[in-house]
Image (cartoon, rainbow, N blue to C red):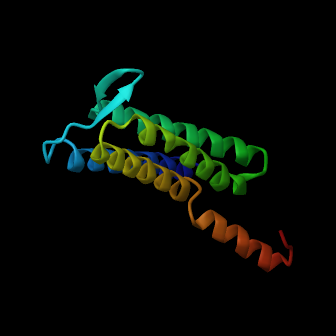
Amino acid sequence: MTNIRTSRALTVSIATAGALLLWAVNGPLPGHELLVDQGGTVQQVGPVAVAAAAVVSGLAAWALLALLERWGRPGAYRYVASAVLVLSLAGPLTAAVDRTTMLTLLGMHFMVGAALIIGLPGFRRSHAAGCKAVRTGTTR
């Protein structure tokens, strides 16, 4: 159980680091301010906001996966998480002040989403379940 928790915590950390890397490469390093319109107020997207959004998203995805595993439906995780990722793209598409900000925010959403969709459930677990079904002669 600890290996699964460690792996999932590492996945959330990697997703957060990836988002921060995209933020740094597209924002402060080239000297571009990433600005979003929040209800008529223009705000700068900073590293704390990027990290907080990635961590909260990661923990929410982890909780969703845990619930689906408890209900015996872990295979549904990738479908639900993918739908949430698509819905989350509305934020960058509507709030970004300029094209660079929009593309950077979309990239961060895809980076975090892909890491969580692929990394949280892991590969071995799915493969092992498939091998077990073949060995025992049962089908899914």
What residue do we see at 42% from left, 21% from top?
39
Q: Quick check: 66 left or right of 28? A: right
What residue do we see at 38% from left, 52% from top?
107
Position above or below: 52 against 22: above
Nearest the camera: 8 or 24?
24
> Which percent across, then down, holds residue 45?
30, 33
User: Which quadrant of the structure image shows residue 24?
Assistant: top left
What residue do we see at 66% from left, 54% from top?
79
Position above or below: 59 against 114: above
- Residue projecting furthest to the right: 138
> Which percent across, then down, holds residue 32?
18, 41
Position above or below: 68 against 50: below
Q: Quick check: 47 left or right of 30? A: right
> Which percent across, then down, holds residue 38?
39, 24
> Which percent across, then down, holds residue 42?
30, 25
What residue do we see at 56% from left, 52% from top?
4
Nearest the camera: 14 or 125?
14
Position above or below: 49 against 104: above
Q: Quick check: 109 left or right of 125? A: left
